C-alpha cells in the first residue's frame, strides 16, 4: 500500500466531510467528497490543501493532521475504520488540525559538562543547571547573560520562582552538594559578557544530594526532593531574623556581583518516601506532587504534611509533571522506556490511562505544554526527545539532536523545545506550535 495515499489502487472509496475549528483561510466547503480508502494523513493533507487553494489561489501548502472520533489517524483510512469498527458506508466526518512540525533547529548552547536541568517557564530567558556546578541564564541560543556560581557539586535541578515577575527575578538551584541556593538578577540585562553572581541565600537541611526543586505557584516558597528520602519546604522571601538565618562573608572577586548572603532552614518536611525523591512539583498553593525511586507517586497537602494520594508504579521514577485536561493529569517516567499518565480523578485504580512506549531506554524528563490538554514532551537516555499527543500512541515527532543521553527537557515561549544532555549541549528546536 502506498504510504502517501496519492497513488495506487483507489477502487475503494470513502465518503468524507472535512470539518475544522480553525478560522479562515483554513476552512473548506462543508459538502462531502469521495477519497480513496488507502489515503493516509499525507494524502488527506493534499486533499485539504487543494480544497483551500480552490478558494485561495495564493495559499501556501502546509501539513495537517486528522482526527476521527477524537483520535489522530496514523494509518490508512481503510485500516483505521477496520481497527475501530467504523462503517465505511456512511459519510465519515474527519476533523483536520494544523500538524505540529518543528520549523528550525537552533545552534546548541554549549556547556562544560552534562546539562542536567532546564527551566523555560519565563518567556524572557531560560535557566540551565550543569554538572560543572554552575547555573546559567540564557536570553537566546548561545547568549548567556548570567552565571550562577557557588555550588561545589553538580547542579541537579533548577526552578524559576517568579517567571512573570518584575525585572528582578528569583531562581533556585539544587545540587549534589546537599544544598539549595537562591539567586536574584535583572532579567532585562542585555550585557554581552555573562555576569557571575552569587546566591543571596543558601538553604541547608538535607542529609544527602538534592535531586529536585520546584517553586510554589505564588512564588513565595519552594520545595525540594532529596536522596535522604524527604521533601523540604523553604521560604524564598522570609525576612532575616536571628535563629533561622546566618550571615556569611563574601569575598570580592573580579567581575563578580557583590551581594549579601544568608543561610536558611527548612520550614517543614514531608516524610513518607523510602528511597530517593527524584522529582517534585508544586502546581497549586496547598498541593505538592512527588515521584520516587521507591516506585511511588504521592500527592501531599503542603499545610498538613499528609499525603492524600499514593500511586504505585512498579518502577523507580525519574521525572514527574502535572498538566493536561484541567491540569489534573500526572505524567511520569523512570527506569523503563515507557512514559505513563494517570488521572487521579478516577478513584480506585492505580492503572495509567495512557502509556507511550517509543523510547528505547530510561525516561529522564517529561513536561506538559502549558496551554494544551493533549501535548507533552519526554526525554530519554536513548538520546531522543519526543513530542506526544494523547490522541495517538505514536510520537508526533522525534528530536534526535543529542549524541548521548538526554537528561532534561522543557518548553519555552510556547513553541520551542529545550533539551539538555550528557553531550554537554542545550539543544533548542523552535516552531513546534501545538495551538
Image (cartoon, helix red, strand yellow):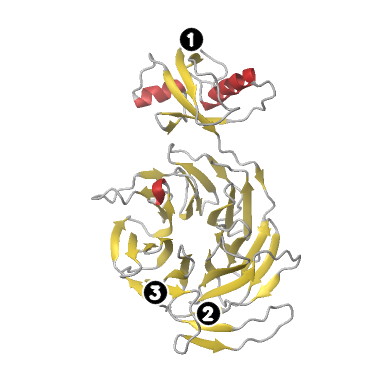
Quote the CA–CA distance across marks 3 and 2: 18 Å
Q: Residue at x 67, y 68 (%)?
A: 146
Query: Circles 1 and 2: CB distance less than 8 Å?
Result: no
Q: Residue at x 50, y 31 (%)?
A: 21
Residue 169, how many percent across, how many down? 59, 67
Quote the CA–CA distance across marks 1 and 2: 72 Å
For disc 1, the marked residue is 11
For disc 2, the marked residue is 202
Residue 3 seen in this snapshot:
no
Residue 271, how many percent across, how many down? 32, 72
For disc 3, the marked residue is 228
Residue 139 lies, with reference to residue 146, above or below; the image says above
Q: Nearer the viewer, mark 3 or mark 2?
A: 2
Crowding around mark 1 (Cα neighbors within 10 Å: few <14, some 14 to 19, many 20+) is few
- Toward the top, the furthest residue is 11
Residue 119, how many percent across, how many down? 55, 60
Could you tell whether 277 is left or right of 403 in the image?
A: left
Q: Residue at x 42, y 64 (%)?
A: 278
Q: Nearer the viewer, residue 241 or 406?
A: 241
- Toward the left, the furthest residue is 348
Could you tell whether 429 is left or right of 280 in the image?
A: right
Q: Secondary structure at mark 3?
A: loop
Amino acid at each position: 500500500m502506498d504510504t502517501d495515499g496519492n497513488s495506487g489502487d483507489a477502487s475503494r472509496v470513502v465518503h468524507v466531510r472535512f470539518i475544522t475549528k480553525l478560522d479562515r483561510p483554513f476552512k473548506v466547503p462543508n459538502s462531502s467528497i469521495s477519497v480513496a480508502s488507502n489515503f493516509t494523513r499525507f494524502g488527506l493533507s493534499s486533499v485539504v490543501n487543494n480544497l483551500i487553494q480552490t478558494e485561495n489561489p495564493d495559499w501556501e501548502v502546509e501539513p495537517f493532521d486528522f482526527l476521527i472520533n477524537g483520535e489522530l489517524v496514523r494509518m490508512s483510512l481503510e485500516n483505521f475504520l477496520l481497527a475501530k469498527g467504523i462503517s465505511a458506508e456512511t459519510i465519515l466526518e474527519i476533523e483536520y488540525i494544523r500538524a505540529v512540525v518543528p520549523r528550525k533547529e537552533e545552534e546548541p548552547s554549549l556547556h562544560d559538562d552534562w546539562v542536567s536541568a532546564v527551566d523555560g517557564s519565563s518567556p524572557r530567558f531560560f535557566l540551565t543547571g550543569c554538572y560543572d556546578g554552575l547555573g546559567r541564564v540564557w536570553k537566546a541560543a548561545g547568549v548567556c547573560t548570567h552565571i550562577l556560581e557557588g555550588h561545589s557539586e553538580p547542579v541537579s535541578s533548577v526552578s524559576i520562582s517568579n517567571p512573570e515577575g518584575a525585572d528582578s527575578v528569583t531562581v533556585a538551584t539544587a545540587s549534589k552538594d546537599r544544598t539549595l541556593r537562591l539567586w536574584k538578577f535583572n532579567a532585562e540585562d542585555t550585557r554581552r559578557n555573562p555576569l557571575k553572581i552569587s546566591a543571596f541565600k543558601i538553604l541547608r537541611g538535607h542529609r544527602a544530594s538534592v535531586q529536585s526543586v520546584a517553586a510554589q505557584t505564588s512564588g513565595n516558597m519552594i520545595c525540594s526532593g532529596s536522596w535522604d528520602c524527604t521533601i523540604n519546604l523553604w521560604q524564598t522571601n522570609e525576612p532575616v531574623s536571628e535563629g533561622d538565618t546566618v550571615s556569611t562573608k563574601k569575598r570580592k572577586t573580579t567581575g563578580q556581583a557583590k551581594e549579601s548572603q544568608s543561610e536558611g532552614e527548612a520550614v517543614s518536611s514531608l516524610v513518607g518516601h523510602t528511597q530517593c525523591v527524584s522529582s517534585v512539583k508544586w502546581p497549586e498553593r496547598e498541593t505538592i506532587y512527588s515521584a520516587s525511586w521507591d516506585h511511588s507517586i504521592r500527592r501531599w497537602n503542603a499545610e498538613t504534611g499528609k499525603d492524600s494520594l499514593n500511586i504505585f508504579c512498579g518502577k523507580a521514577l525519574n521525572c514527574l509533571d502535572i498538566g493536561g485536561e484541567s491540569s489534573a493529569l500526572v505524567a511520569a517516567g523512570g527506569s523503563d522506556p515507557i512514559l505513563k499518565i494517570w488521572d487521579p480523578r478516577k478513584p480506585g485504580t492505580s492503572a495509567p490511562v495512557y502509556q507511550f512506549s517509543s523510547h528505547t531506554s530510561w525516561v529522564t524528563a517529561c513536561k506538559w505544554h502549558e496551554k494544551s490538554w493533549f501535548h507533552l514532551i519526554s526525554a530519554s537516555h536513548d538520546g531522543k526527545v519526543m513530542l506526544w499527543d494523547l490522541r495517538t500512541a505514536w510520537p508526533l515527532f522525534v528530536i534526535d539532536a543529542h549524541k548521548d543521553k538526554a537528561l532534561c527537557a522543557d518548553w519555552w515561549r510556547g513553541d520551542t523545545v529545550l533539551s539538555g544532555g550528557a553531550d554537554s549541549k542545550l539543544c533548542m528546536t523552535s516552531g513546534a506550535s501545538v495551538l
